[in-house]
Amino acid sequence: MATGTRVQLSGFKELGAQLKRLSTAVARNALQRAGTSAMEPMARLARQLAPKDTEELAESIDVGTVAANDKADVGKYAYHLAKAAGLSNAEAVTEKRNALRAVKGERGNYYADVFMGPVAGREKQDVIKGFVQEFGTLTREPQPYLRPAFEQDKGAMLERLKKEIWFEVSSAIARSEAAKARRAARG
């Protein structure tokens, strides 16, 4: 059984102060770029450690962001629950908006999702096979590849993440301030 992993992180107050200098979208994009860049070497390692009996698994391991649909799913679910409860369309839309606002409030303004692992192409079965390889089943022994990649690279990934966040956020601030200066110069 895998043991818990402890990491100590600091500097979030300072990071938050710098992120406040940016719009929410620009801050989120900077964090997503930093996370994606920092996790790519871990993904390469996971591809190397993936069982070789299925080449598709190694090829399916990717790094990306999941911000596109996770909030939309919350809204859709709230809308469908409201309709199932017999509420009108307008009331269901209100429930959807309230659910989306609650999600944004839980995550704060500067939130970014980044993932690393098998990605579904056209079929979810490919992803399921990847998790079966990692964890096994009652009849199949596990062949872990994600956890070992994480354990081998976690310290280096956190160092890369620190550098990438610094670079992306400071670059975004510089671009934002330059744009403000150009607008002020135009009058």
Image (cartoon, rainbow, N blue to C red):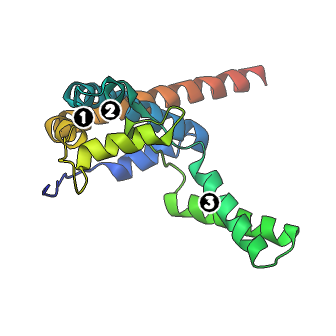
User: Looking at the rendered structure, which numbered label has been put on residue 173?
Assistant: none
Residue at 44 percent of width and 35 percent of height: 119
Identify the residue under disc 1: 157
Q: Are marks 2 and 3 in contact (CB under 8 Å)?
A: no
Q: CA distance from mark 3 to mark 1?
A: 30 Å
For disc 3, the neighbor class at 10 Å (few under 14, some 14 to 19, many from 20) is: some
Instruction: Point out the residue furthest to the front here.
Output: 139
Identify the residue under disc 3: 74
Closer to us: mark 2 or mark 3?
A: 3
Q: Secondary structure at mark 2?
A: helix
Closer to us: mark 3 or mark 1?
A: 3
Image quarter of the C terminus: top right
Inspect the image, locate mark 3, and give the three-letter code of the amino acid beneath it.
Val
Residue 118 x/y as whole percent:
38, 36
Inspect the image, locate mark 2, and give the three-letter code of the amino acid beneath it.
Met
Residue at 49 percent of width and 42 percent of height: 124
- Quadrant assignment, res 80: bottom right
Q: Judge whether 172 appears above or below 70 on screen.
A: above
Q: Judge whether 103 appears above or below 53 on screen.
A: below
Inspect the image, locate mark 1, and give the three-letter code of the amino acid beneath it.
Met
Q: Is residue 44 left or right of residue 29?
A: left
For the question of whether residue 114 can be seen, the reply is no
Image quarter of the N terminus: bottom left
- Quadrant assignment, res 73: bottom right
Q: Secondary structure at mark 1?
A: helix
For disc 1, the neighbor class at 10 Å (few under 14, some 14 to 19, many from 20) is: some
Q: Secondary structure at mark 3?
A: helix
Identify the residue under disc 2: 39
Q: Earlier in the sequence, mark 3 or mark 1?
A: 3
